Amino acid sequence: MTHARTFTDANFQTDVLSSDQLVVVDFWAPWCGPCRAVGPTIEELASEESDSANVGKLNVDENPQTAAALGINSIPAVVLFRNGEVVDTLVGVRSKADYQRAIHAAA
């Protein structure tokens, strides 16, 4: 089973922006109830969508530079990146099907 990767300010450029694969990043924080609700879905997507996307999470409290640089104002925010560019953003708690549709549309 593939687990969601942990993205940080230190590895974001290499692991997300320079990736040639679709990357799905869940911007979250431990104190955010809706973020905790989305967490298990992100873990499932990391396992189920590993062929089409690299799925991970970025804690905005521990990695404020990346969140600020991307203008992340509301969490949870799930952002899809392809070739270093944002291709879709889903804010708030969404269904697993919503995330899957976004991944397959961007893949």
Image (cartoon, rainbow, N blue to C red):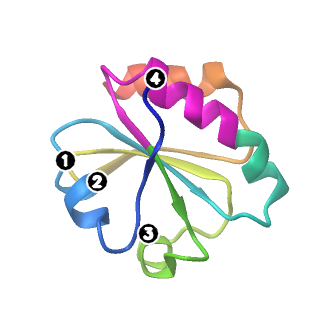
Q: Are marks 1 and 2 in contact (CB under 8 Å)?
A: yes
Q: Which residue is mark 1?
A: 19
Mark found first going from the N terminus, 1 or 3: 1
Residue at 17% from the left image edge and 55% from the top image edge: 18
Mark found first going from the N terminus, 3 or 4: 4
| SS at mark 2 in the image | helix
Q: CA distance from mark 2 to mark 3?
A: 13 Å
Q: CA distance from mark 4 to mark 1?
A: 21 Å
Q: Which mark is residue 16?
A: 2
Q: Amino acid at mark 2?
A: Val
Q: Is residue 51 above or below residue 18?
A: above
Q: Which residue is mark 3?
A: 70
Question: Residue 62, image x and y in percent?
Answer: 55, 76
Mark 4 vs mark 1, foreground winner is 4
Q: Are marks 3 and 4 in contact (CB under 8 Å)?
A: no
| SS at mark 1 in the image | loop
Q: CA distance from mark 3 to mark 4?
A: 30 Å
Mark 2 vs mark 3, foreground winner is 2
Q: Are marks 1 and 3 in contact (CB under 8 Å)?
A: no
| SS at mark 4 in the image | loop
Residue at 80% from the left image edge and 50% from the top image edge: 34
Q: What residue occupies the far right of the structure in this picture?
A: 33
**Count of number-bearing discs:** 4
Q: Tell me the magenta residue range.
A: 39-55
Q: Which residue is mark 4?
A: 1
Q: Amino acid at mark 1?
A: Ser
Tag 2: Cα neighbours inside 10 Å, few (<14), some, or many (≥20)? Answer: many
Mark found first going from the N terminus, 2 or 3: 2
